[in-house]
Image: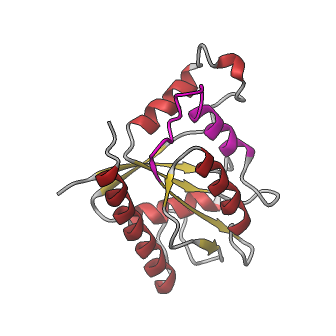
Amino acid sequence: MVSYRVGYFVGSLSSTSINRTLSRALIRLAPTDLTLTEIRIDNLPLYSPDFDADYPPEARALKDAIAASDAVLFVTPEYNRSIPGALKNAIDWASRPWGQNSFDHLPAAVIGASIGQIGTAVAQQSLRAVLSFCNARQMTAPEAYVYFQPGRFTDDGEVTDESTARFLGDFMNEFRDHIERVLTVLPRS
């Protein structure tokens, strides 16, 4: 059986992030042939082209973690109708310097949770535009805008609502199939 290493990003830096809770739920519901590992973004300095000739260790670790992954999963909140600055900063580090874009042809999926009714729909559209420019191979369906309600998730990621668990499990199964399809055509070197 083939297994896949998935690096995941939690877009929020908050210690009480509902998207971190969502990431725990996704790990619990993922097919057994997916191994998920968080890619840290909380320790990155702000990106500047001044660093392109000599990346700091935190940015090299970010690029190494992505290189060690077969695919990436973005679990993001919505800040001001877009993605959090820390997540955009991480993407900027990973996609540079010119010609060394870590997301090129990499299978990717986007999901997010919010206490608002529309989930993270607008943030996800913003993120998808950035990932398109970075040439990531995005899973376009199913879209997953999670309305985060009290009691639907435990802090350790157990999903207490059966229909939500089924939806998230289906999302992760679709992501697994997407990874396999992309890597069949565009194997990672």
Which residue appears farthest toward the left when viewing the image? 1
Which residue is at a point 57% across and 71% down the rendered structure image? 144
- Tell me if residue 137 comes above or below residue 116 in the rendering: above
Residue 40 appears left or right of 11: left
Q: Nearer the viewer, residue 172 or 160?
A: 172
Which residue is at a point 79% across and 61% down the rendered structure image? 81
Is residue 95 inside the magenta stretch? yes
Q: Nearer the viewer, residue 24 or 70?
A: 70
Is the N terminus in the top left, top right, bottom left or bottom right quadrant? bottom left
Is residue 106 inside the magenta stretch? yes
**Picture quadrant where residue 175 is located:** bottom left
- Tell me if residue 165 comes above or below residue 61 in the rendering: below
Q: Position of residue 130 (x, y in %)?
A: 65, 49
Q: Nearer the viewer, residue 148 or 177?
A: 177
Q: Position of residue 104 (x, y in %)?
A: 49, 41
Q: Position of residue 27 (x, y in %)?
A: 42, 60
Which residue appears farthest toward the front when viewing the image? 185
Which residue is at a point 64% across and 67% down the rendered structure image? 113
Range of the magenta residues? 85-107
Is the C terminus in the top left, top right, bottom left or bottom right quadrant? top left
Q: Position of residue 61 (x, y in %)?
A: 49, 28
